[in-house]
Image (cartoon, helix red, strand yellow):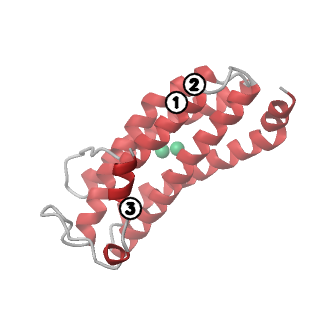
Amino acid sequence: MEAKAKTSKPTAEKSTTKTPAKKSAAKDLMDLFEDSLKDIYWAEKALAKALPKMQKNATDEKLQSAIENHIVETEEHIVRLEQCFEALGKKAQAKKCDAMQGLLDEGKSIMEETEPGAVRDSGIVAAAQKVEHYEIATYGTLAAFAKVLKEDECMNILLMTLNEEKNCNELLTKLADTNINSQAVEA
Ligand SMILES: [Fe+2]
Ligand SMILES: [Fe+2]
């Protein structure tokens, strides 16, 4: 482990050198846009599979129903991304999103590291909010790309999803602040 950590430590020289591009690197912003759509398409699909488990692990009824509601929305986000690909005249393709995989792994370990009840609920909210923040950042960026690329149909679709991610995040904040965290502190 130590040796590995030592070799992966960035040196001053390396950090000032530009990263060489892969052969498959994006040629332009449209390429980067399409690549990013493939990433979030994978991410939404992975999330749709993971959310039911988070819902089952939640104890607070309001948290359960917030997650249930977001499962329905997430399924819709997948459909909307397919509409985006269609608007671009491209086949919908998923490309593994390491960031979402990491966030979902973290959510899984939070559940393993807590007893069911108020403390686990606080952990579930934390994990879910990290996911929502990731989605907010992603959809915000994608909508901005679509705007400059003059892909208005895509932009409108992406903005619709962005709003739902923001609303979900706000609801989670509200649930944590009004009830869940204070119950966890007494548990
Ligand atoms: Fe989503
Ligand atoms: Fe979401």
C-alpha span from label 2 to label 3: 31 Å
The C terminus, quarter of image: top right
**Badge 1 vs badge 2, beta-carbon distance below 8 Å:** yes
The N terminus, quarter of image: top left
- On screen, residue 159 versus residue 28, left or right, reads right
Residue on which the image places disc 3: 9
C-alpha span from label 3 to label 1: 28 Å
Query: Which disc is residue 90 wearing?
Result: none
Mark 2: amino acid: Glu
- Front in this rendered view, residue 154 or 50: 50
Callout 1 secondary element: helix
- Front in this rendered view, residue 128 or 2: 2
Callout 3 secondary element: loop
User: Label 1: how many residues lie within 10 Å, few (<14), some (14-19) or many (20+)?
Assistant: some
Q: Looking at the image, is 3 positioned above or below residue 20?
A: above
**Residue at the image point whose x is 30% and y is 63% from the top:** 33
Q: Quadrant of residue 180?
A: top right
Mark 3: amino acid: Lys
Residue on which the image places disc 2: 112
Of discs 3 and 1, which sits in the foreground? Answer: 3
**Residue at the image point whose x is 42% and y is 48% from the top:** 99
Point out residue 129 in the picture as x, y percentages from the top left corner: 61, 45
Residue on which the image places disc 1: 108
Point out residue 77 in the picture as x, y percentages from the top left corner: 43, 43
Point out residue 17 in the picture as x, y percentages from the top left corner: 29, 78
Callout 2 secondary element: helix
Mark 1: amino acid: Lys
